[in-house]
Amino acid sequence: MKKLLFILLASLLPLMAMAQSDFSERTGKGFIERYSDPDAIHWLGGDTSFSWQSGYMMFAMEYLWKQTGNPLYFNYIKKYVDQHVEEDGNVIGFRASDLDNFVSGYAILFMYEQTGDEKYAKAIEKIRRGFDDYPRFDNGMFYHARSIPQTWVDGVFMGQIFMARYAKTMNHPEDFSEVVRQITSSAALCDNGSGLLHHAWDPNGKSSNIWSEGMGWVAVLLADVFDYLPMDYPGADKVMDVLVRMCSGLKSCQDQNTGMWCQVVDCPTAPGNWNETSGTGMFIYLLQTAIDRGFIPKEEYQPIVDHAYKGILKKVVINSDGFINLTDCSSIGVMHSYEEYISQPREISTFAAYGSFILGTGIVELVQSR
């Protein structure tokens, strides 16, 4: 019995020894050690690393660099970008076949802002031109992919986080109108009536459910879009309304026991539903950002964030090599029913979960350190 107790305590020591402020940085550093070549970040069996998995991890690494100034994160992003951008601006691996492939251009915009190197500007323009003939519905909403005539709310993030930064960095303010349209129209089409967004829409109607990570991508977009979109731009007030309504909706369906949000967000007490890690990290990021910027009242929402932060830390497992693994993650496409969403595998350490965990824990830890 004493031996068993010793083993259990030993397995917990690395987690117990971590200061609260260490979770985001330890995750980021461990991720870079695991994936020293950023081109290794892609779907298992996939043939391109210029897509959302790598793009989102660069997004998270930029966040860590801005918060810490540690050149480790900057150099990792630069390595990734330089493995894809040639001197003439050609972007190796970029295909304008679906919205998932645009988000990696966000990292190129970052490198251009930091260096002014014209090869990055040329690459950025080539990616931007991918939208010129990209298919839309009659209402102006982009297809998720040229082969998928549906609007997915996660795809709104993939395209519009790039477009918003492009409009500001490259001095094309006219493109803010696209950002406003895609955010507000997708919200109008997919809203469940309380600010939460169903996973997808097509002319036949909304998809069946509100998937955690799917809506989480929109949460991250809303958290950061006002870094680029001027508050007085026409329609920005409507974007703000989408943000505030989503925060209110999240408050109403937080799992009161764990502080997290569930795979099907608006059904926290339904049979079989389970706490999902990636979406929870994204929602924490939105809520804490909105609090910090005065978009929502601190006294009402900070307890929500603090409860969620404590909950998401319970999904951390330290493996035998000392790396952080994350349990109960989900990266999927559009499902057709509640049962399909909750029956999906509870994955471990998906790329989306790592990025979301870094964002969610990082922004709370920043507040804690003040």
Image (cartoon, grey):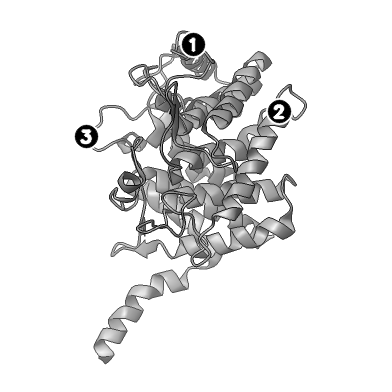
Real-space Cα distance between discs 1 and 3?
28 Å
Q: Which residue is mark 3?
A: 45
Asked which quadrant contains residue 172, the reply is: top right
**Vertical position of residue 353 compared to residue 174: above or below:** below
Q: What is the quadrant of the C terminus in the image?
A: bottom right
Amino acid tagged 2:
Ala
Gap in angstroms between the C-alphas marked 2 and 3: 40 Å
Q: Which residue is mark 2?
A: 236
Give the crowd class for mark 1: few <14, some 14-19, many >=20 residues within 10 Å. few
Query: Element type at marker 2?
Result: helix
Which SS class for mark 3?
Answer: loop
Tell me, yes or no, if residue 114 can be seen here: yes
- Residue at the spot of label 1: 129
Give SS at disc 1. Answer: helix
Q: In terms of sequence position, does the residue under pointer 2 or pointer 3 come before the other?
A: 3
Residue 146, image x, y percentages:
37, 16
Q: Is residue 168 left or right of residue 136?
A: right
Q: Is residue 173 left or right of residue 270?
A: right
Q: Which mark is residue 60?
A: none
Q: Nearer the viewer, mark 2 or mark 1?
A: 2
- Counting residues from the start of the chain, the first of labels 2 and 1 encountered is 1
Q: Who is closer to the viewer here, 370 or 206?
A: 206
Which residue is at the far top? 133
Q: Residue at x 47, y 14 (%)?
A: 136
Q: Amino acid at mark 3?
A: Gly
Residue sitting farthest toward the front? 204
Total numbered labels? 3
